[in-house]
Image (cartoon, helix red, strand yellow):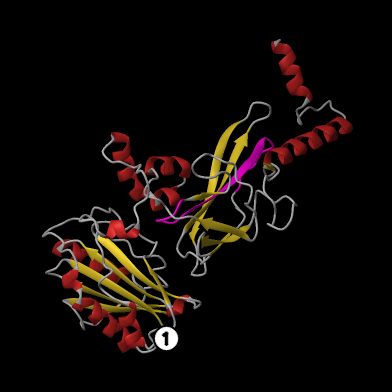
């Protein structure tokens, strides 16, 4: 058995003096073939998705990929959503095993778009195989999106496409469980970071310390009446906005979806009907106590685009601007409040209009339920800059 192995090694050696040129040539070709086989890129499985939504032509697991993320109800683009694309590899012939993965992540642009390039650092080897590609999209306040199946019952998704893909995110409902949501998201550093705040409520659900299921979702009126939930609806009215800006159109009034409402945070959104976002007005309020309010104001000063201290309202104030959105934030230290007002440049056509709106808001803060002295945030990410913070104050 040993001598047979030795003889075989000799027959495939390039150093044998007794071999004919023909044998040496064949051996060289075989060696080059083995080298090429070992250094070639991975085999690519057939993609289970179409190249575009309007065709049955299969896509390419390697990519590139592009699409848009929108609100499922309004069809409006969602900015600053975390998008992660991952490629999973296998190695082996016959019996295969996992061989690592690659991930590319980004945040959607102001118009909700994303682009994921083809990976350029692929593993090599004749037994390497690209098994699948998965796209995951996460935005706080929404149910996450996966390209392979849907949240809830594990239904297989059939509407994903390589190009011109439209991701419709549905609103998160209070009857849903964070522990199931985290399990649905899977791995990936970018998504794990974006969804990290869900670990705390998920842990409480496992311990049975919360009641994630309710008989039915509470209406906005019922929630507003709760002593445990902040309500800022009294801070600014449609009539007051019109009185300052002169806007004659109609508003749809609701809450922003970039952060979950709680006992320490609430928002008010005046969405101009039939108009672009540059006509919208929004108010965000953190009622978190004096110490935490100082910290939150410092974070806004460091994270809002083009932020400049102005000291024109409250104990501290700043102006910011991102694209077509004007922003003003101010601190009311004794009340433990941080208030951020955003107004589109087509609505607030003069900088002074933003300040006038802010002063109207300040005049109504006495109607809020005051935050307790030294109260801390129950929302572990309540200090995060709102959606599109680098282009939307």
Q: Quadrant of residue 260?
A: bottom left
Q: Is residue 159 visible?
A: yes
The part of the chain drawn in magenta is 122-143
Image spot of residue 181 (x, y percent): 43, 44
Query: In what element is the residue under mark 1?
Result: loop
Q: Is residue 313 above or below residue 267?
A: below
Instruction: Report the residue at 26% width, 79% height from top.
Output: 358
Q: Quadrant of residue 11?
A: top right
Instruction: Report the residue at 71% width, 58% height from top.
Output: 54
Please state if 370 lies on the left or on the right of 273 as rendered. left
Q: Is residue 382 visible?
A: no
Instruction: Report the residue at 64% width, 26% height from top.
Output: 95
Q: Nearer the viewer, residue 134 or 272?
A: 272
Instruction: Report the residue at 43% width, 79% height from top.
Output: 250
Image spot of residue 296 (x, y percent): 24, 65
Q: Nearer the viewer, residue 104 or 59?
A: 59
Image spot of residue 370 (x, y percent): 15, 64
Q: Nearer the viewer, residue 162 or 361?
A: 361
Q: Nearer the viewer, residue 40 or 312?
A: 312
Residue annotated with mark 1: 248
Question: Magenta segment: does it hold 137?
Answer: yes
Graded by Cα atoms within 10 Å as few (under 14), some (14 to 19) or many (20 or more), the crowding at tag 1 reads few
Please state if 134 lies on the left or on the right of 351 as rendered. right
Q: Is residue 321 above or below residue 118?
A: below
């Amino acid at each position: 058995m040993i001598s047979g192995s030795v003889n075989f090694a000799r027959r495939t050696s390039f150093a044998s003096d007794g071999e004919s040129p023909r044998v040496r040539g064949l051996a060289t070709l075989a060696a080059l073939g083995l080298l090429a086989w070992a250094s070639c890129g991975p085999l690519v499985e057939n993609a289970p998705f179409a190249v575009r939504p309007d065709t049955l032509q299969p896509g390419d697991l390697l990519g590139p990929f592009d699409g848009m993320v929108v609100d499922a109800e309004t069809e409006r683009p969602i900015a600053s959503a975390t998008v992660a694309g991952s490629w999973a590899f296998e190695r082996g012939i016959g019996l295969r095993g996992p061989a690592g993965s690659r991930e590319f992540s980004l945040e959607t642009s102001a118009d909700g778009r994303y682009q994921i390039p083809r990976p350029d650092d692929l593993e090599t080897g004749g037994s390497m195989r690209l098994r699948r590609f998965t796209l995951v999209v996460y935005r706080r306040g929404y149910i996450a999106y996966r390209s392979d199946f849907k949240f809830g019952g594990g239904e297989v998704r059939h509407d994903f496409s390589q190009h011109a893909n439209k991701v419709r995110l549905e609103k998160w409902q209070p009857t849903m469980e964070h522990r199931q949501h985290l399990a649905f998201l899977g791995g990936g550093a970018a998504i794990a970071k974006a969804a990290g705040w869900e670990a705390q409520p998920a842990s409480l659900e496992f311990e049975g310390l919360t009641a994630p299921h309710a008989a039915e979702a509470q209406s906005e009126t019922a929630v507003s009446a709760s002593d445990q939930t902040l309500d800022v609806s009294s801070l600014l009215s449609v009539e007051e906005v019109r009185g300052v800006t002169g806007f004659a159109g109609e508003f749809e009034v609701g809450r922003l979806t970039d952060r979950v409402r709680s006992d320490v945070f609430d928002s008010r959104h005046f969405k101009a009907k039939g108009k672009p976002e540059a006509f919208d007005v929004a108010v965000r309020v953190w009622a978190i106590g004096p110490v935490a309010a100082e910290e939150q104001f410092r974070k806004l000063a460091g994270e809002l685009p083009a932020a400049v201290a102005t000291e024109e309202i409250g104990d501290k104030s700043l102006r910011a601007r991102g694209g077509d959105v004007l922003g003003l934030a101010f601190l009311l230290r004794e009340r433990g409040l941080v208030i951020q007002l955003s107004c589109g440049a087509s609505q607030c056509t003069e900088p002074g209009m933003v300040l006038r709106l802010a002063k109207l808001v300040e005049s109504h803060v006495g109607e809020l339920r005051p935050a307790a002295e030294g109260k801390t945030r129950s929302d572990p990410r309540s200090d995060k800059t709102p959606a599109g913070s680098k282009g939307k104050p």
